[in-house]
Amino acid sequence: MKELSVALVGNPNVGKTSLFNRLTRSFDHVGNYPGVTVTEKSKTVSYKSRAIKITDLPGLYSLTALSPDEETARDCVLNAKSDLVLGICDSKCPARSLYLMLQLIEAGKRVAIVFNMADELKLIGKRIDTKKISSALGLPVAVVSAKTKAGIDEIRQLLSDFTSKNSVNAYLPYMEKLQIKKVCKIVGGRAEKAGLNPEYAAIKLLENDADVIEKLSLSNGELSEIRAFGVGVAEVAAARYEYIDELLCGAFVSVKKNPRTLSAKIDKVVLNKYLALPIFLMLVSGAFFITFGLLGHRLAEAVAEWVTLFNEGVLMPLLNKTQLPSWCVMLICDGIVGGAGSILAFLPEIVLLFFFLSLLEDSGYISRVAFATDGFFRKIGLTGRAAFTLIMGFGCSATAVLTARGIDDERVRKKTAMLTPYMSCSAKLPVYSMICSVLFPRAKALVILLLYLLGVVVAIAIAAFTEKRIKRLSGVKSKLIIELPPYRAPSLERVIQLLLHHTKNFIVKIGSIVLALSVSVWILSNFSLVDGFGAAADKSIMATLGGILAPVFSPLGFGNWKAVSALLSGIAAKEAVVATLNALGGVLAVFSGKYAIASGAAFLTFTLLYIPCVATVAVLLKETGGRFTAIVMTVQLAVAYLVSLFVRLVVIAFCVATPLAVCVTVAVAALCASALAIKAVLTKNVCCGGECAFCSKKCKQNANKNERIVK
Amino acid sequence: MTVTDACLGKTYEVIKVNGETVIMRRLLDMGFTPKTKITVGVKAPYGGGVSVRLRGYEVALHTEVAGLIEVAEL
């Protein structure tokens, strides 16, 4: 039998990727917020000896696209030669999902409708009558739950049984009401020539779809003739929804009285004016102290011990027995196991970080963060939607930059992409962890938390600066419209999958790029151009190369070739910094002298802020262009240098002066700065002057005062 | 009146959506069509928007967007 190609199409956050993962048994990134999937992905599976190619697409609300990722999805749907479209619907809000399905049917696609999240349907006390919908639309309809696997086999059966013959064209009664036939008379011939379904072209013309108008190259006279029918976007949308309401009237029925208001209750607390910020900070710092302080640290120590035990107890004696040359034994023990293996110790911390990040994503809280921060983000030329991308940046900068595609305003999209690398990614974590364990053993979690905060603060400062001095974006056209998904508890199955997935990714990365780097660093630092192997480290190739750049970093306190080589290797992958430092004699060999702590702090700051890894640079290049990427890199280097210098001076001052005096000065300075910042932000508050739900009491009083003054 | 003038927690009926085509389109796509019942949820804690429930789901709207939706009391 011929291969069947199936596309998964549906609104954002209805579980297309979850279903894709179930059907193809893969593990693509999912989350409980709209816009996780930004590119199309395909996988071929075979079921009952039939090859089925399944394609997962980004989410859509309508076939009229408003942002780049929607354009990709729409073009994929319309141009793809897929035999069947699996229209994924959210069981809880079938109306909005069916709206897109109707458009797919209008476009002449063969559609099978799948209502996902059936498990949540029970929670809201509703039931979907698939037979009624199926007979009304003339399409196959199924109910599944990607989470509990219920109904997945039925979908597989449906796909393997599918033949293009057994589907009928659906009848859409509202098409007559919209006078589609009259429009067809005008443009029908031309639509067929352009390869479009005439009825689809007609309805898109009524909707004033720029894409279709361009394809048909209509004259102004014809366009005004069509407009004379008096049917526009609003009427078309209303007609579709009226039909859906009719359809659902008998098919989407309450089984019991609506019992679930939990999400609304949680929202009242989480989005409370006085509680929102404290709750957010508590959650974040709680996650931190568990990851780095309580649990992660102990696990990391245990793993590190195993690695050393294995290296010294098992591997070394074994290799010594063989007849390998001594440099080869050293390469394996020091270079490979000592370098790449040492990073393995940070696996628990990284997995824990991803675990908390996924809790944030899966619970639905991340959308509330975007909603709550929109007002603030807007003042620095971003939108609340940027919160998704920036928070993802704590996991991996490269993938996070990709998710910026969902932002519809181009300037905001670029700005968000530019700021994402300042969010400290998980690969930088081993560096912090290693250096802090040695230099700040008692305040490890606190120092790491400060580093993360520093990244965020620098990003906000840069955003505010560019907004004030360089390019004002305050008039951004993109207005926030974000879905707030219901709160969900992640399933145990998903947590286990996630842990395995990140463990695998991390080990693969160490086994490939970090391994290669640490081996080359080891070779470069143990061989000399003049003396060959065994030369003093100071005369090695690495020392010569690093020595050239070293003086530049003297003001920062780490102007030695070892630190510079570590930073250079970090451009390939941040974990490599750890491997390099290990290969060159450990933290204490690099940061020595009276103010080792200050140099270490400056080094950490520099690692946080300087050029991201090559993978991120590549994504930035692709998404924002060469010139913009070059500017971003230059700014990052400059900012990293200046901020590190500042951090070093502060730490030195802290060591020299009495700690108390410095604490007081720093605290006062920080308070003043934040007070000024808050004042600057708040004074821009605009007031409608009327009785509305948005203006505070104070604002109304001000409005009254102004009125009195005018009088 | 528009959603910006609405009371939190109350249910209204949509009359029509005004405004720029792009945003109007998105709102219509999401189901803000005439006669739809919508419930105003919570306000963004630091200003900037309001959440609205309709057709079985919840959506956060920026103040300016909320101002485009004309509603009537039930």
Image (spheres, coloured by chain):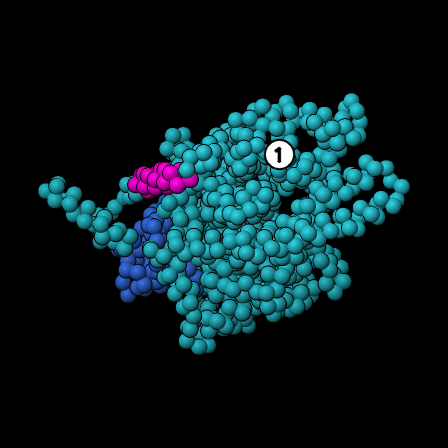
Chain colours: A cyan, B blue
Residue underneath mark 1? A590
- x and y percent of residue A180 in the render? 46, 54
Q: What residue is shown at x 54% (from left), y 33% (from top)?
A: A594
Quadrant the C terminus of chain A occupies: top left
Q: Amino acid at mark 1?
A: Val
Task: Give the dominant element type of the magenta stretch: helix, strand or loop.
Answer: helix
At x 44%, y 57%, the residue is: A484
Where residue A239 sits in the image (x, y, percent)? 42, 59
| Front-lying residue, A515 or B24 | A515
Q: Is residue A89 left or right of residue A663?
A: right
Q: Residue visible at 34% across and 40% down? A: A668
Q: Position of residue A241 (x, y in %)?
A: 43, 60
Mark 1, other Cα within 10 Å: few <14 / some 14–19 / many ≥20: many
Q: Residue at x 62, y 67 (%)?
A: A149
Q: Residue furthest left?
A: A711
| Nearer the observer, A504 or A153 | A504
Q: Nearer the viewer, residue A689 or A173?
A: A689
Residue at disc 1, secondary structure: helix
Residues drawn in magenta: A659-680
Residue A473 occupies quadrant: top left
Pick the front one: A235 or A503 = A503
Single out the residue that lies furthest toward the bottom.
Answer: A256
